[in-house]
Image: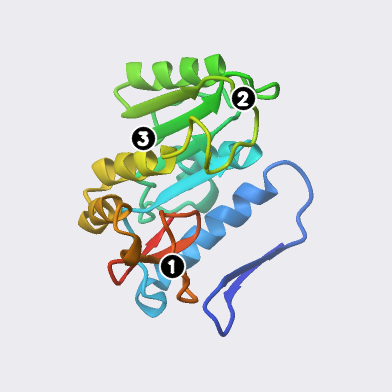
């Protein structure tokens, strides 16, 4: 059983008691449906969104970004597919014509997820005509996150650019440009940031979620 709701701060809350494989994906689909159904109330857009995750979270992002899975689980044809799926270091190998545009990155010294596996999957997606972008970073292990201070630093900007290219969202383009303007990026509590970070960012006065 799943309960999906919004608290007084408008955080999306999901409580599940379902056991077994795929409960996280089910919760994700229900959250997606809730946001789409209450987009005006939440001040959110139904389209142009991206899904991102690392390791096991990347598997979930890829699964949720597949339009056939979206329909199979919800039975709805009005729920838009993600404009982009952003994945870090995962061994996920499933390929489908219904997968979304995919950006992926991984370190060459990752002992958990092979960068070659990720590259091979994206090549297969490309062969199906699905837009992809892949980056491998020499010497990096599993879980490098934002890559600050490493050879992967700036990958998030590349991912945002890829997302913008797929969604055509002008404010995402602005977000990339403004990452070089330190005064234009803030957290929700007003803390100045040097670059876009995972979560909600205030960029040039606009909310950008990544």
The residue at which mark 2 appears reads as 91
- The answer to whether residue 156 is left or right of residue 173 is right
- The answer to whether residue 64 is left or right of residue 182 is right
Decide: few, some or many residues near mark 1? Use Cα within 10 Å; few <14, some 14-19, many ≥20: some
Nearest the viewer among 3 and 6 is 6
- The answer to whether residue 14 is left or right of residue 150 is right
Residue 23 in sight in this render: yes
Residue 66 in sight in this render: no
The residue at which mark 3 appears reads as 101
Q: Secondary structure at mark 2?
A: loop
From the top left corner, tell me how far across and down residue 177 is, in percent.
Answer: 25, 51
Q: Secondary structure at mark 1?
A: loop
Give whichever of discs 3 and 2 has the lower sequence position.
Answer: 2
Residue at image location 48% in from the left, 51% down from the top:
75
Residue at image location 49% in from the left, 45% down from the top:
52
Residue at image location 32% in from the left, 39% down from the top:
162
Decide: few, some or many residues near mark 2? Use Cα within 10 Å; few <14, some 14-19, many ≥20: some
């Amino acid at each position: 059983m799943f309960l999906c709701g919004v608290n007084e701060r408008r955080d999306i809350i999901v409580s599940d008691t379902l056991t077994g494989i795929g409960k996280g994906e089910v919760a994700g689909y229900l959250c997606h449906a809730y946001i789409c159904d209450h987009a005006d109330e939440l001040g959110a857009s139904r389209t142009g969104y991206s899904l991102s995750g690392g390791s096991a979270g990347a598997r979930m992002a890829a699964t949720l970004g597949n339009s056939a899975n979206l329909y199979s689980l919800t039975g709805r044809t009005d729920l838009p597919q993600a404009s982009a799926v952003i994945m870090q270091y995962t061994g996920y190998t499933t390929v489908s014509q219904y997968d979304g545009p995919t950006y992926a990155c991984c370190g060459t010294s990752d002992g958990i997820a092979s960068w070659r596996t990720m590259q091979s999957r994206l090549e297969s997606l490309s062969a199906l005509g699905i837009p992809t972008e892949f980056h491998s970073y020499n010497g990096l292990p599993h879980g490098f996150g934002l890559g600050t201070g490493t050879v992967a630093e700036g990958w998030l900007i590349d991912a945002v650019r890829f997302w913008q290219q797929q969604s055509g969202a002008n404010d995402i383009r602005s977000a990339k440009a403004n990452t070089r303007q330190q005064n234009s990026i803030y957290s929700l509590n007003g803390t100045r940031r040097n670059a876009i970070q995972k979560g909600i960012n205030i960029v040039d006065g606009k909310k950008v979620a990544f």
